[in-house]
Image (cartoon, grey):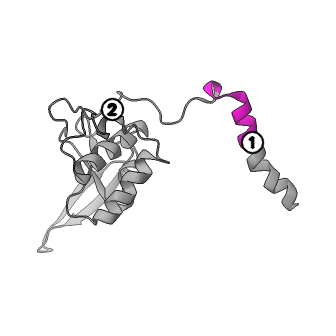
């Protein structure tokens, strides 16, 4: 573990705190969730939400119309759900809860009513195991990676 020294606002007495190693933060004091920060740029928040539900492969079904977490229909609420799903799928790593500075880790369970936010151990990996991929799909992906290298030489 690293030691971090934080100084009080008046600068009189330094306060030494233990800083956890980067990565999984759930060991600190129980379960953690990732939520969108209020007050951030709506454009940045929308871009981060689009990424989480697209390339990030978060399960965003619950925030689609008719889903358990669709209401309230706010960008902050929907982004929080998607960010948390991505965060949980990616090992609760601090880096998995950044989203361009639009999110933060919390110890407060953001679940409400029928909308249950995933917690550590309740979701699997975002990427399917290699053995479950279609073999022809793997070969196409490999070919797409290697062909430019071959043609470039």
Give me the C-alpha separation between circle 1 and circle 2: 32 Å
Element marked by disc 2? loop
In the image: residue 36, left or right of residue 153: left
Q: Position of residue 93 (x, y in %)?
A: 39, 45
User: In the image, residue 134 lies at what x, y percent?
Assistant: 67, 28
Q: Could you say which is closer to the camera, residue 108 or residue 53? A: 53
In front of the other: 85 or 137: 137
The disc, 1 or 2, on the residue closer to the chain's N-terminal end is: 2
> Is residue 132 depicted above or below 105 in this figure?
above
Instruction: Indicate yes or no whether the magenta region holds residue 141.
Output: yes
In this view of the protein, can residue 82 be seen by the observer?
Answer: yes
Q: Which mark is residue 120?
A: 2
Q: What is the secondary structure assignment of the residue under circle 1?
A: helix
- Residue 129 vertical placement versus 108 (above, below): above
Q: Is residue 20 above or below residue 151?
A: above
Q: Magenta part of the protein: which range?
A: 131-142
């Amino acid at each position: 573990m690293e030691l971090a020294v934080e100084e009080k606002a008046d600068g009189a007495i330094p306060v030494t705190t233990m800083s956890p190693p980067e990565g999984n933060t759930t060991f600190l004091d129980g379960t953690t969730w990732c939520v969108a920060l209020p007050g951030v740029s709506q454009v940045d928040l929308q871009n981060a939400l689009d990424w989480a539900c697209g390339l990030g492969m978060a399960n965003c079904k619950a925030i689609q119309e008719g889903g358990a977490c669709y209401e309230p229909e706010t960008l902050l609420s929907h982004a929080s759900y998607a960010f948390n799903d991505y965060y949980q799928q990616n090992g609760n790593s601090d880096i998995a809860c950044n989203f361009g500075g639009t999110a933060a880790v919390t110890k407060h369970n953001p679940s409400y009513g029928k909308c249950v936010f995933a917690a550590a151990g309740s979701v699997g990996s975002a990427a399917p195991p290699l053995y479950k991929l279609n073999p022809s799909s793997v070969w196409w992906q490999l070919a797409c990676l290697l062909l430019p290298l071959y043609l470039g030489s």
